[in-house]
Amino acid sequence: MSKYVVGVDVGGTTVKIGIFTAEGEVVEKWEIPTRKEDSGSNILPDISDSIKKKIVSNDINADDVLGVGIGVPGPVDDDGVVHKAVNLGWGKFNLVDAMKPLMPGVLVKGGNDANVAALGEMWKGGGQGHDNIVAVTLGTGVGGGIIINGRLLNGSTGAGGEIGHLHVEDNETEACGCGNYGCLEEYTSATGIVRLARRALDATAAPSCLRDTELTAKAVFDAVKDGDAIAIQVAEKFGDYLGKGLSLIAGVVNPEVFVIGGGVSKAGEILFDYIRPSYEANVFHGSKDAILALATLGNDAGIYGAAKLILSECE
Amino acid sequence: MSKYVVGVDVGGTTVKIGIFTAEGEVVEKWEIPTRKEDSGSNILPDISDSIKKKIVSNDINADDVLGVGIGVPGPVDDDGVVHKAVNLGWGKFNLVDAMKPLMPGVLVKGGNDANVAALGEMWKGGGQGHDNIVAVTLGTGVGGGIIINGRLLNGSTGAGGEIGHLHVEDNETEACGCGNYGCLEEYTSATGIVRLARRALDATAAPSCLRDTELTAKAVFDAVKDGDAIAIQVAEKFGDYLGKGLSLIAGVVNPEVFVIGGGVSKAGEILFDYIRPSYEANVFHGSKDAILALATLGNDAGIYGAAKLILSECE
């Protein structure tokens, strides 16, 4: 008889939910709106109602559901305590305890969304076959998820894997969103790449196709592929910083593989050409052979990983 | 009836061994020479012979010995495979398998000596009461041991916690022993502090009591305590680099406490005055409150930690 797990990825606009077999096949995936009013107090009831209906409509016996994993946009510790999720209107509370009356008898686990997405990529994405991985999300910001021996590293206050704020530049004069100066995110997020490009364009009068387009990370890497000299210079700076950042992470946790995701990763494996030289120049030799891989699950990484939270618990 | 564990710390000159109660009381601790000839093939038989004799002389029933933990100066993975231990003449082999015929029926676990020492400091030293700690050893080099939820993070190739080689300076012209440039160890080991002092003295003609003494890390911190301006400048540089290095580690694993040991740590808590400002300036806010503590077990951290390897396994 089949067993099932449910993965939930709570975002600021929509909640993604998936029912999976224990082997990781999608039974059904869907979305519901995130109702943030009233301090987000409807969000968990909406989720449990929606899951219950779909369990029925898919003819699944409720006893065959191993549990519900939930990824949250904020720090979540090993006990399931959400420390804050500003985007949802949530303060500090225990997610597992809050779900208990809504889904009696069902195992519930919570995790930070970036960490949970890392677990998804390990299970069914770019990190498949490995159990020591670091997932790096290059989006508007830079997030990370660290998995050691198949388990998420949440950190003592839920701030494990906050790699976007690793200090990689001593001479930065613009502050990062976090208040510090010279954070990895300032150079390697989509926004950071645009900033690097703007600085490069301002520093010279040399021609570049980037002068005639809206500056985005995609435009920069498209221009790199077309051989634009300034875009290549920007890609090199991006790679210098990210390679250095990954070398620092490797010096601490020595993963087998870095799985690179987020919007910037759509540029593809060409990113690795720019990251690898700086990584190898800075990393301790014991970590030199770490693999660079692209994330493959896109926006579904969160629901896969949330489902895997439950399976890891049942192992 | 009492249960016992044995902790072994294999060094290049001597092997330290301790028999402990399961509660961590020392029954007896002693040393034997490390016989490195013949590719170190006598080392394990010497260890098992010595342990067997001491078990008898302490009137311990062999059945009450829960196991033998062994710390090795080189990378050791989770399966007990030693990847290399140059100082012992050892190549790659499985330590656990090699001990089996020597001590039939006894649980054996192996670990890297710096990592194992971290476990010791967590159990009975400066990290007591915490289970997410990073132990930092400031000796001839800089080593680290990382413990997540009470378990050692060895890394995928045994290079987890190799924090001495985190890149913290872009403008270094002298290579580190590892071949890279600007490693944490180049500024914060005992040797690194001497180098910083030499550079500071060469850069000025200003008087300093450091000009009249043999330059050592101890001399530098003694001069700091006497108010020597150049020594203070050296301590500030040391603190800038170490604070930055610890902030990078915190950005990855978010520990509750950093336990600082090794020869340099004998300077005492004055070190923290120099480390803390740079740590706080560079670290992500979620890790700002991490505790700085001094290691307390000294050279015994290794045998305590090796014993704890066994107890962690039995939990």
Image (spheres, coloured by chain):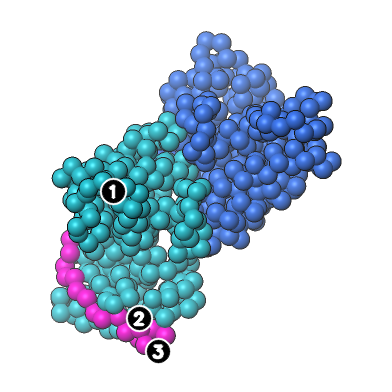
Chain colours: A cyan, B blue
Report the chain holding disc 1: A
Q: Secondary structure at mark 2?
A: helix
Residue A44 marker: 2
Residue that mark 1 sits on:
A205
Q: Disc 2 to disc 1, how far (Cα)?
A: 55 Å
Point out residue A91 in the picture as x, y percentages from the top left corner. Answer: 48, 78
Residue that mark 3 sits on:
A38
Above or below, comparing residue B258 to residue A286 in the picture: below
- Circles 3 and 1, Cβ within 8 Å, touching? The answer is no
Q: Secondary structure at mark 3?
A: helix
- Circles 2 and 1, Cβ within 8 Å, touching? The answer is no
On the same chain: label 3 and label 2?
yes
Report the chain holding disc 3: A
Magenta stretch: give its range.
A24-42
Marks counted in the figure total 3
Question: Furthest-front residue in view?
Answer: A205
- Residue A313 visible within the image: yes
Q: Is residue A289 left or right of residue B135?
A: left
Point out residue B298 in the picture as x, y percentages from the top left corner. Answer: 71, 37
Q: Disc 3 to disc 2, how far (Cα)?
A: 12 Å
For marks 3 and 2, the one nearer the N-term is: 3
Point out residue B245 in the picture as x, y percentages from the top left corner. Answer: 55, 45
Q: Nearer the viewer, mark 2 or mark 1?
A: 1
